[in-house]
Each structure stands twice: as structure tokens, then as C-alpha cells.
């Protein structure tokens, strides 16, 4: 009984460790991810009903296709995928660790017979002498050697690139790190937005679902600017002067633009959009012709502005460019008895023309001011640095896994009474062809050195 | 001389090289193969110059707003061709298998032809979101990754053409004909793997730099927009390829098919998403 139970647990464990599961899950993630790129995500019900019909909309809702990357089933696959990665790493790590902790210093006959790269030769001299010679060649051409003795034979072992055995593990662990960072960001961070009208301030932002969040400090937008490329209406830059206030004191001041946010207390403010805040107003200079008295006033479009003696005027229209004469307004003057005067046009670039019209007042347009609001994306993500650490490791890990290999060379020396019999073997855990060339070279040098030196010693 | 003319010469060079590679397969003349490789290299150098020149021209046209030529569909397709040649020439240097050129150069040639004949090549100023160094790193790494997959694709096609015949082939004498000119299937299989080994870390880096850019521009490193998601799909596919290969023994034919599917997904990620789906990365509509 106990045994079948254990074997059940073993079976579950093996299943969770298995690469077959890994491949199935990775392919499943790839396939299901397509859904969310084809079906609109997080749209309004009306949008789905228009596109797919009521019945399909209900089906999508049931299958959680509306927000599929956060659906139970997709998160479930991701969770199983990480469990798979964890189990697989736990299972395989001891094997890799053994390479480091217990290198095979003494090669078994199996290694000498089974390796892809091997050689045998004999030479004269004493075991120790030959071993020393060989050892120095290998140390020079490959890596430092370790000498061991067993059953009257001498053994040499040298290795390079053992760390590359860890490449795959670093890669796998970094995937887990990235996921952990993402989860932390999801639980303890938020994404929100806020619009601030130039000159005003806020201390709350709202999430996409409209939930307000208190910042705990105040953000003021002193100025917003948008500049355009010459002769086009493509925005080139837009930026906002932001000030952070704590207890009424200015603590941070930064001009932010797209791709250059402001960070304060882990909360980032990104320039993301802008728009006009309410109606603009016109700065207008009105001169009473009879007295020469000057009024400088601000006029909103469509609103009556009082002058003197019961006269008033209203701006009724505005254009940025009137027939190449530049910015212009259309306005009319109301006389004290309430009569609308005839409308006329005033050009900003030609301030004296209106005095020739011959009314009670002459007008000049000094400027036009359009207040903007700046649209800020506000994000707090305490997991992001963990994600970046994971990203760094994943690149580092996969490069290590692919482009470096663990290479080992073994030598044994045996004195059969007349000669020293030398056996060599080597292997690499990847890029075998490259190692084969290197091995041949080393082996040749070892052989010539071992053979050349021995007669000298005797003579 | 402007960069447009140099790109024309590039296209001509790639076309010539392709024809020469075909001629090599037909004639088995090694000199032809050598000249074809030289012409490819010349095309690559001309294209490199052209890219540099276009970069310079952007400063002449846009003043201080000049930028690396990696910002619209035209420029990306041209850069794709350049990346393919870079990876191809590196693999040629290592493996000296000249017939590969006949299957890789057409991809670069078609990219150049498409870019020059039907894409909008003017140097336009950038919208603010694209004014970021991360964009440059992102595009370079992604496209070098794509290029690795393109070379793997070309090699896999050769593998699939050859393996069917090889299995039917009887006797010990080497296979004759065109397929006999192809590298041994074992070499093709190995090159497929190597090219993906180059492409995979680069794509990883491409996704990471893209995430970094999105983070600086919009405050989210990942938002599951279609382009991002498709790059992840491609990444998953090649990760499956790697694992299936060394543990479940998916070498040879199955590995070649996975590589073909992977490249199809890569192309969809690159072009399909812009042309078929919509999203943030919508420069494809230009
Ligand atoms: C998309 C996610 C994954 C990526 C990017 C990834 C990446 C890698 C890389 C780069 C290697 C080294 C490849 C090579 O040696 O040719 C590797 C090896 C390996 N992977 Fe993954 N892997 C992923 C998922 C998984 C999962 C879920 C498992 C769980 C079973 C797994 C199990 C293994 C094993 C057993 C090895 C061989 C280890 C060794 O050589 O010592 N991988 N992986």
C-alpha cells in the first residue's frame, strides 16, 4: 500500500518536473496568447456586441476572453508553468552542483573509452616527470590541473567553463524573478492617470476603473507647452513644469516630457497627453476714440465685455490664420441702447487698421491664450526593479548557456615496467566540434612534449 | 550620391549575389561561389554606408532632431535586410557552406525590393513617444534576432528539401544533382540550431529593451498589446524548440519544421501585427 502511495506522489513529482510538461505549457501559452491579440481586450460591452453579437459576447464573458491575460485559466497556466520551472530546477540542481563539488578527478575506464575525444601514446621516463611535463602543457594551453594517485596510476584533471553549467538555471530562475516582480507590482502598485489644468494642483489620481487614490502630497502644474515641427501640426515635444508640494513647501521641481518622467516617493508621473482646458480668452486693447482712453481687457468668446458709457463688445469668432494675415477675431460692439453693431474683423498682426473703421471704439488684438491641461500617467510599481534584475539575469543566463561550455580533460599515466602509457580524454557539454579541434591541438603538444623531454633526461 | 542611390546599389548587389549562388549550385564552380560571397559582402558594406549616410541625412533635413534610421516601416525593412546579411556572413565565415546563400539572400533581396518599391521612404520627424534611445537599442536587438531566425529558416528549407531525397537515396556514392551540393543534412541541422542560438538571446534582449522603453515612455513595461504579445509568442516557440531539441531529441526534420513555424510567427509579429491587427506599435500603417 505504502509503496503505491509513494509512487503516486513520485508520479506527480515527475510530472511536475518533466520537460514534456514544460514544452506543452510553453506551446499552450504561445497558442492561447493569440486570442487576446485577435479579440479586443477590456473593451466596452457595446463594442463586443457590435462586433460579435450578443451570444458571442456572453460566451466571451464566460471564457474570460474580455481580459484574457488576467483570466483565471491563463494565470493558472502561468502558475503551473512556474511550478514546473521550480520543480525542474530543484530536481536538476544537485546534479549540476556535483560537477562543482565533486569533479571527476579520476577518470574511469568508461571515460577513456567513451569520450568523443581521446588519445593514447607511450613515452619514456618516470610517471612523475611525465606527469609534470604534461601538467605544465595543459596548464598553459587549457587550465590548471589536479593530480591524483590511485592504484599505482597517476591521474590529471583539468576543466574550464564550469559556470556555463549554470546558464540554464540562471535563465530559469530569472523567469521566476521576473514573474515575482510582476506579481509584486500587481499587488502593491497601481496605474492611474490625472489631468491637471495649468496653474492648478491635485493630490488625488484615479485608476482606470475610476477609483481615487490619495497621493499623500500635492502636484502642481505651473506650465504646459507643446511645440510643433515647422510647417506641420505634428507635435514635436510636449512638456509640463511640475512641482511637488509637501505641507505647502515645494520639494521637487521638474520639467517632464514624453520619455522623461518625474519620480517622487516611488510614484512616477509620465507626460502622456494634453488638451485644451475650457475656452481660451483674448487680450484686447480697446481705445475710446473720443477721449483716447485705453481699456485692456480679457474677453472670452461669446461673452459680453463692458467698456465705458454703456458700450460693450463681444468676440464671436476666432481663427489662427485669416487668409494669410495671421490670427484674427470677429467682434461687434453693442451700443448703450442695446443695439448690436455690425460685426467686423481685427487682425493681431495689423493693430492700427481698426482705428480707420470709425466707430466709437477702436480695437487691437494683443494675444490669445488657451489654457491647457496636461494629461499624466501615474504609476507606482514596487516590483519593477525586481523585473529589471530578472531581465538582466535572463540575458546573461541565456548567453552563458549558449555560448560557453564546460570542457574537461582527463589524463592517466601508467608505468608498465618499460614505458609510461599515457591516456587522454576530453569532452565538452556543447560545441563539440570546436572542442574537438582544441583537443587535438592540446593532445599533440602533450605528446611531443612528453616524448621529447624523456630522452634528454636520460642522456 | 544620396542614401537612396546606395540602397539601389545594395539591391542590385544582393540580386547579383543571389543569381551567382544559383549559378554555383547549377555549375558547382567554386570560383562562382567565391565571387557570390564577395558580392554579398560588397552589398553589405554598401548598405552599411547607406545606413550611415541616411543617418547623416536625417540631421541635414531635421537639424537637431536627426535620428538613427530605424523608425518607420521602410527603415525597419531595410535594416532587416542588413541584419540578415550580417548574420549570414558570420555563419558563412564559420561554416563556409556557400550554397546557404541561395536560400538566405532571397529573403534579404525581397525585403529590399519591397521597401524600395512600395514603402514610404521620406525622412519624417518623430512623434515624441519615439524620441528615445531605447527605441534604437530595441530595434537593433529585435532585428538581429529576427535575422538569426531568418537564416535558420533558410537552412531549414534546405534541410527539408534534402532529407526527403536522402532517405530515398540508395547506395554509398554521394548524392548527385543540386541536392548533392547542399551541405550534409547533419551540418544543416546544426546550423539551424546555431542560428536560433544567436537569435534567441537577441530576441530576449529585444523584448527587454522594448519593455524598458515602454516603461520610460508610458510607465508600464508590459501591457499585452498585440505586438508585445506576439513577440512573446515567438519567444515561447523558440524556447520550446530549444527544449524539444536537447531533451526530447527533436532534431532533424521536426526541428526544421519548428524553425519554419517559428519564422512564420516572427514575420507575423513583425508585419502581420501592423498590417492585420492594431496596437501601439502602429508605424506599419504609414
Ligand atoms: C520560456 C521559458 C524558458 C526559457 C526561456 C528557458 C531557457 C532555457 C535555456 C536557454 C536553456 C539552455 C539551452 C541549451 O542548453 O541549449 C534551458 C535548458 C533547460 N531547460 Fe529551460 N527554459 C524555459 C522553460 C523551462 C521549463 C518550464 C522547464 C521545466 C521543466 C525547463 C527545463 C529545462 C532543462 C531541464 C534544461 C536543460 C538544463 C541543462 O542543460 O542542464 N525550461 N532552458
Image (tube, grey):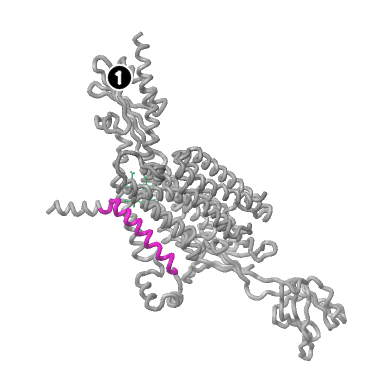
Q: Secondary structure at mark 1?
A: strand
Q: Residue A48 at what x, y percent from top left?
A: 43, 75
- Image vertical order of residue A198 relative to residue B5, above or below: below
Magenta region's main secondary structure?
helix
Q: Residue A369 at what x, y percent from top left?
A: 70, 71
- Nearest to the observer: residue B261 or residue B216: B261
Q: From this viewpoint, which residue is outermost toward the bottom?
A: A337
In-image side of A109 versus A159 (left or right): left
Task: Please state the extent of the stretch shown in magenta in the rendering.
Answer: A15-40
Q: Quadrant of the N terminus of chain A?
A: bottom left
Q: Residues within 10 Å of mark 1 (few under 14, many from 20)?
A: some
Tell me which corner region of the image, top left, top right, bottom left or bottom right, holds residue A441. Answer: top left
- Nearest to the observer: residue B22 or residue B135: B22
Tell me which corner region of the image, top left, top right, bottom left or bottom right, holds residue A60. Answer: bottom left
Q: From this viewpoint, which residue is outermost toward the left?
A: A1
Task: Give the residue displayed 47% in from the left and 50% down from the top.
Answer: B145
- Image vertical order of residue A456 relative to residue B11, above or below: above
In-image side of A355 versus B63 (left or right): right
Residue A262 in view here: no
Total marks in image: 1
Residue A38: in magenta span: yes
Task: Give the residue displayed 37% in from the left and 28% down from the top.
Answer: A440
Q: Residue A360 at what x, y percent from top left?
A: 84, 83
Q: Quadrant of the C terminus of chain A?
A: top left
Q: Residue B110 at what x, y percent from top left?
A: 52, 54
- Nearest to the observer: residue A406 or residue A246: A406
Residue placed under numbered mark 1 in the picture: A122
Tell me which corner region of the image, top left, top right, bottom left or bottom right, holds residue A252. Answer: bottom right
Amino acid at each position: 500500500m505504502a509503496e503505491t502511495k509513494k509512487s503516486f506522489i513520485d508520479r506527480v513529482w515527475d510530472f511536475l518536473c518533466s520537460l514534456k510538461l514544460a514544452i506543452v505549457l510553453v506551446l499552450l501559452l504561445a497558442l492561447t496568447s493569440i486570442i487576446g491579440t485577435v479579440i479586443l481586450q477590456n473593451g466596452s460591452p457595446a463594442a463586443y456586441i457590435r462586433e460579435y453579437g450578443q451570444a458571442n459576447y456572453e460566451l466571451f464573458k464566460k471564457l474570460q476572453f474580455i481580459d484574457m491575460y488576467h483570466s483565471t485559466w491563463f494565470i493558472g497556466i502561468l502558475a503551473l508553468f512556474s511550478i514546473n520551472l521550480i520543480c525542474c530546477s530543484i530536481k536538476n540542481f544537485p546534479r549540476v552542483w556535483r560537477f562543482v563539488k565533486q569533479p571527476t578527478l579520476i577518470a574511469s575506464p568508461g571515460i577513456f573509452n567513451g569520450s568523443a575525444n581521446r588519445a593514447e601514446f607511450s613515452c619514456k621516463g618516470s610517471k612523475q616527470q611525465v606527469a609534470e611535463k604534461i601538467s605544465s602543457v595543459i596548464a598553459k594551453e587549457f587550465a590548471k590541473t589536479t593530480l591524483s594517485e590511485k592504484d599505482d596510476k597517476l591521474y590529471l584533471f583539468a576543466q574550464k567553463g564550469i559556470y556555463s553549467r549554470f546558464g540554464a538555471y540562471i535563465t530559469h530562475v530569472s523567469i521566476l524573478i521576473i514573474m515575482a516582480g510582476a506579481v509584486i507590482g500587481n499587488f502593491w502598485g497601481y496605474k492611474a492617470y490625472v489631468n491637471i489644468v495649468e496653474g492648478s494642483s491635485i493630490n488625488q489620481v484615479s485608476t482606470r476603473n475610476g477609483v481615487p487614490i490619495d497621493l499623500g502630497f500635492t502636484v502642481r502644474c505651473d506650465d504646459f507647452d507643446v511645440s510643433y515641427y515647422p510647417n506641420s501640426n505634428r507635435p514635436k515635444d510636449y512638456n509640463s513644469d511640475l512641482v511637488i508640494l509637501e505641507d505647502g513647501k515645494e520639494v521637487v521641481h521638474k520639467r517632464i516630457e514624453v520619455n522623461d518622467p518625474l519620480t517622487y516617493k516611488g510614484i512616477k508621473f509620465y507626460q502622456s497627453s494634453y488638451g485644451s482646458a475650457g475656452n481660451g480668452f483674448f487680450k484686447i486693447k480697446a481705445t475710446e476714440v473720443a477721449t483716447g482712453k485705453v481699456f485692456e481687457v480679457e474677453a472670452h468668446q461669446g461673452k459680453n465685455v463692458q467698456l465705458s458709457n454703456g458700450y460693450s463688445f463681444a468676440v464671436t469668432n476666432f481663427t489662427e490664420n485669416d487668409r494669410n494675415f495671421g490670427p484674427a477675431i470677429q467682434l461687434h460692439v453693442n451700443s448703450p441702447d442695446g443695439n448690436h453693431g455690425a460685426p467686423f474683423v481685427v487682425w493681431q498682426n495689423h493693430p492700427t487698421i481698426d482705428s480707420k473703421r470709425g466707430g466709437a471704439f477702436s480695437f487691437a488684438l494683443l494675444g490669445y491664450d488657451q489654457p491647457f491641461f496636461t494629461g499624466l500617467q501615474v504609476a507606482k510599481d514596487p516590483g519593477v526593479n525586481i523585473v529589471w534584475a530578472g531581465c538582466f539575469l535572463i540575458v546573461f543566463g541565456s548567453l552563458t548557456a549558449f555560448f560557453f561550455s564546460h570542457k574537461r580533460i582527463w589524463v592517466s599515466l601508467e608505468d608498465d615496467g618499460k614505458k609510461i602509457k599515457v591516456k587522454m580524454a576530453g569532452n565538452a557539454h556543447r560545441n563539440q566540434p570546436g572542442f574537438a579541434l582544441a583537443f587535438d591541438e592540446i593532445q599533440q603538444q602533450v605528446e611531443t612534449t612528453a616524448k621529447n623531454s624523456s630522452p634528454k633526461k636520460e642522456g | 550620391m544620396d542614401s537612396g542611390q546606395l540602397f539601389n546599389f545594395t539591391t542590385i548587389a544582393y540580386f547579383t549575389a543571389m543569381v551567382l549562388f544559383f549559378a554555383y549550385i547549377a555549375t558547382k564552380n567554386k570560383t562562382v561561389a567565391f565571387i557570390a560571397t564577395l558580392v554579398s559582402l560588397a552589398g553589405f558594406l554598401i548598405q552599411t554606408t547607406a545606413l550611415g549616410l541616411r543617418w547623416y541625412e536625417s540631421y541635414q533635413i531635421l537639424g537637431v532632431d536627426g535620428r538613427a534610421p530605424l523608425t518607420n516601416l521602410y527603415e525597419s525593412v531595410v535594416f532587416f535586410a542588413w541584419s540578415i546579411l550580417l548574420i549570414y556572413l558570420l555563419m558563412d565565415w564559420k561554416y563556409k557552406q556557400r550554397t546557404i546563400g541561395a536560400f538566405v539572400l532571397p529573403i534579404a533581396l525581397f525585403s529590399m525590393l519591397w521597401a524600395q518599391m512600395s514603402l514610404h521612404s521620406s525622412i519624417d520627424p518623430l512623434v515624441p513617444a519615439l524620441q528615445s534611445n531605447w527605441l534604437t537599442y530595441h530595434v537593433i536587438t529585435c532585428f538581429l534576432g529576427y535575422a538569426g531566425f531568418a537564416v535558420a529558416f533558410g537552412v531549414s528549407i534546405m534541410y527539408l528539401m534534402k532529407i526527403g531525397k536522402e532517405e530515398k537515396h540508395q547506395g554509398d556514392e554521394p548524392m548527385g544533382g543540386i541536392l548533392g551540393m547542399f551541405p550534409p543534412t547533419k551540418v544543416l541541422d546544426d546550423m539551424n540550431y546555431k542560428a536560433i542560438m544567436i537569435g534567441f538571446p537577441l530576441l530576449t534582449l529585444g523584448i527587454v529593451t522594448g519593455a524598458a522603453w515602454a516603461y520610460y515612455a508610458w510607465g508600464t513595461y508590459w501591457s499585452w498589446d498585440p505586438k508585445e504579445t506576439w513577440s512573446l509568442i515567438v519567444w515561447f516557440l523558440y524556447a520550446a524548440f530549444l527544449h524539444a531539441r536537447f531533451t526530447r531529441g527533436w532534431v532533424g526534420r521536426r526541428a526544421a519544421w519548428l524553425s519554419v513555424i517559428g519564422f512564420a510567427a516572427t514575420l507575423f509579429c513583425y508585419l502581420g501585427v501592423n498590417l492585420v491587427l492594431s496596437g501601439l506599435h502602429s508605424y506599419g500603417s504609414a
